[in-house]
């Protein structure tokens, strides 16, 4: 009878010991999961899933799209009239530069009736109006004027596209210096397309 009691107490003790270990393991696992959850949320808060560069590119492109209305048809044509404007902003990782691509499709109905061969100056005017809101060219002789210099372009570009961003003056200058433009004027009737490119704050060639 005494042996039976000792066996029973021994079995009970082993059972209680196992239960303690199991409960301890569950507590440790729960605490580990809680710590992991805390770390994950901190990472989600502290690490940006979208880089700040992507945000800047998106802002540039959004601003350009908002300015498409500048190129709407004019009652009195003072420049090439367009039926479609397309803009896109990309980052070329290989050369570490931002590319602003602009394409203007000349108005098909107008240029069926009126023959006109687009020029490099039209390329520049398209860029100037979309980015700077100014022609930069004499409307009659299609020559550069003094009302949109490279310094003017730099100031306007920074104030229009890089303001209200967490950027130092050095970063703004660097982004401006490393932003380039590619512009294409499409002639849908005669195929006299014109292409020009260059720094965002310089004349395009």
Image: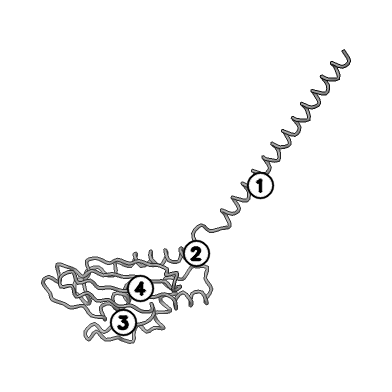
Residue at position x 47%, y 70% from top? Answer: 163
Residue designated by label 1? 35
Residue at position x 22%, y 74% from top? Answer: 193
Residue at position x 87%, y 17% from top? Answer: 3
Q: Earlier in the sequence, mark 2 or mark 4?
A: 2
* Disc 1 + disc 4, Cβ < 8 Å: no
Nearest to the eye among marks 3 and 4: give it: 3
* Disc 2 + disc 4, Cβ < 8 Å: no
Give the numbered dot on residue 205: 3
Nearest to the eye among marks 1 and 4: give it: 1
How many other residues sit within 10 Å of disc 1, few (<14), some (14-19) or many (≥20)? few
How many other residues sit within 10 Å of disc 3, few (<14), some (14-19) or many (≥20)? some
* Disc 3 + disc 1, Cβ < 8 Å: no
Tag count in the figure? 4
The CA span between labels 1 and 4 is 50 Å
Residue designated by label 2? 52
Nearest to the eye among marks 3 and 2: give it: 3
Residue designated by label 4? 131
184 left or right of 111? right
The CA span between labels 2 and 4 is 21 Å
Name the quarter where the C terminus is drawn.
bottom left
Q: Secondary structure at mark 1?
A: helix
Q: Secondary structure at mark 2?
A: helix
The CA span between labels 3 and 2 is 31 Å
The CA span between labels 3 and 1 is 59 Å
34 left or right of 52? right
Name the quarter where the N terminus is drawn.
top right
Q: Residue 131: horizontal and vertical position, in percent?
A: 35, 73
1 left or right of 143? right
């Amino acid at each position: 009878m005494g042996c039976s009691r000792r066996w029973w107490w021994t079995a009970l003790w082993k059972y209680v010991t196992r239960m303690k270990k199991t409960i301890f393991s569950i507590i440790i696992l729960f605490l580990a999961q809680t710590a992991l959850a805390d770390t994950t949320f901190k990472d989600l808060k502290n690490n940006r899933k979208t880089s700040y560069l992507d945000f800047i590119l998106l802002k540039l492109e959004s601003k350009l799209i908002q300015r498409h209305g500048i190129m709407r048809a004019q009652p009195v044509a003072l420049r090439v009239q367009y039926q479609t404007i397309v803009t896109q902003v990309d980052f070329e990782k290989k050369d570490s530069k931002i590319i602003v691509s602009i394409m203007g499709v000349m108005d098909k109905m107008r240029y069926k009736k009126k023959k006109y061969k687009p020029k490099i100056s039209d390329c520049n005017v398209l860029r100037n109006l979309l980015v700077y809101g100014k022609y930069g060219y004499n409307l009659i002789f299609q020559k550069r004027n003094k009302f949109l210099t490279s310094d003017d372009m730099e100031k306007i570009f920074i104030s229009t596209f890089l303001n209200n961003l967490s950027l130092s003056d050095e970063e703004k200058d660097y982004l401006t210096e490393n932003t380039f433009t590619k512009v294409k004027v499409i002639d849908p009737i005669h195929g006299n397309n014109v292409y020009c490119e260059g720094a965002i704050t310089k004349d395009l060639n």
